[in-house]
Image (cartoon, helix red, strand yellow):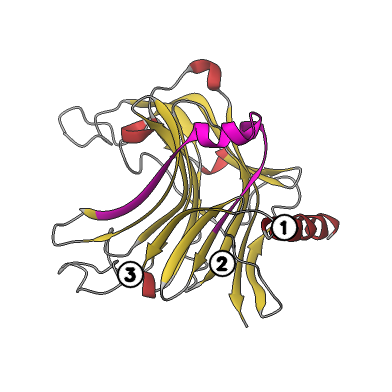
Amino acid sequence: MLKHAIKTTSTALLFLLSSFTSFAQPARDASWQLVWHDEFEGTGTFDPQKWQPETGFVRNEEDQWYQAENAYTQNGLLILEGRLDSIPNPRYNPRRKDWRSIRPYAKYSSASLNTRHSYSFLYGQMEVRARIPAVEGSWPAIWTLGTHREWPSNGECDIMEFYHIKGKPHILANAAWGNDRPYNAVWNSAKIPYQHFLDKDPGWGEKFHLWLMDWTADHIRIYLDGELLNDIDLSTTINGSIGEHANPFHAPQYILLNLALGGINGGTLHPDSFPMRYEIDYVRVWQKK
């Protein structure tokens, strides 16, 4: 309870300070209520009633093998840990073309958790306080996916991604939805050079930061430490024929936290970057009463 009180005070201070700066993060008055959260208290495993782990090679030709044991709580934090590893691939088959099958083993392990089978929400504010491993090869993310239809017609909102673009580190804030081609997305992406944040604070990478998704029927606005990164007009996020011309962001979404390694966006991995820790202090969802 003490830690929860300290965290709430810190968040309130951030909103107070934001009102005296050019930051645009919205204030939260008494009409808001906390409807779901995880403070990651204690030491041990994550709460299986809230989070479900992914296993194996999952997406984006990433280099890691996801496994539950790489996600744990420690000192009031959720740790998603990337490790050098050697894990035999039970799907290995060199005669197949699928990237998940042609690898005899995984050289790395990491963790990915989601609330697909336990919690989803429609509209509100989701905030995550976290410290990311801002090194080449890492691809940490905070994101949501729709509970209905296949990707991307279910809608995806990337509240945070970090990876290198043309050799330069960036922080991204994105939304994706469907068109008339299977598994092909329309993207609204904000790609902010990491240097932008270092220019404001050279020690940015060693600190925790607050990401916030402000989601209404009209927009999704994504903030980082009170600074608006992307303002997504939901009148534009209409699926193509595969998604029945529906708006995926007018339907519930569930939460994902993961530390991907390498793959199509992560970049080159370096042995001296391991073990790699993505640390999440809390996840909270607020909605109007």
Considering depth in this image, is 101 or 192 the residue closer to the camera?
A: 192
**Separation (CA) of disc 1 from disc 2:** 13 Å
Considering depth in this image, is 183 or 20 the residue closer to the camera?
A: 20
Residue assigned mark 2: 125
Considering depth in this image, is 150 or 215 the residue closer to the camera?
A: 215
Reply above or below: 217 against 98.
Answer: below
Query: How many numbered marks appear?
Result: 3
Q: Quadrant of the N terminus?
A: bottom right
Residue assigned mark 1: 11
Mark 1 surroundings within 10 Å by alpha-carbon count, few (fewer than 14), some (14 through 19), many (20 or more): some
Considering depth in this image, is 278 or 160 the residue closer to the camera?
A: 160
Q: SS of the residue at dot 1?
A: helix
Residue assigned mark 3: 248
Reply above or below: 11 against 240.
Answer: above
Q: Amino acid at mark 3?
A: Pro
**Separation (CA) of disc 1 from disc 3:** 30 Å
- The answer to whether residue 157 shows anywhere in this view is yes
Mark 3 surroundings within 10 Å by alpha-carbon count, few (fewer than 14), some (14 through 19), many (20 or more): many
Magenta span? 186-212
Q: SS of the residue at dot 2?
A: strand
Q: Picture quarter containing residue 232?
A: bottom left
Q: Picture quarter containing residue 226?
A: bottom right
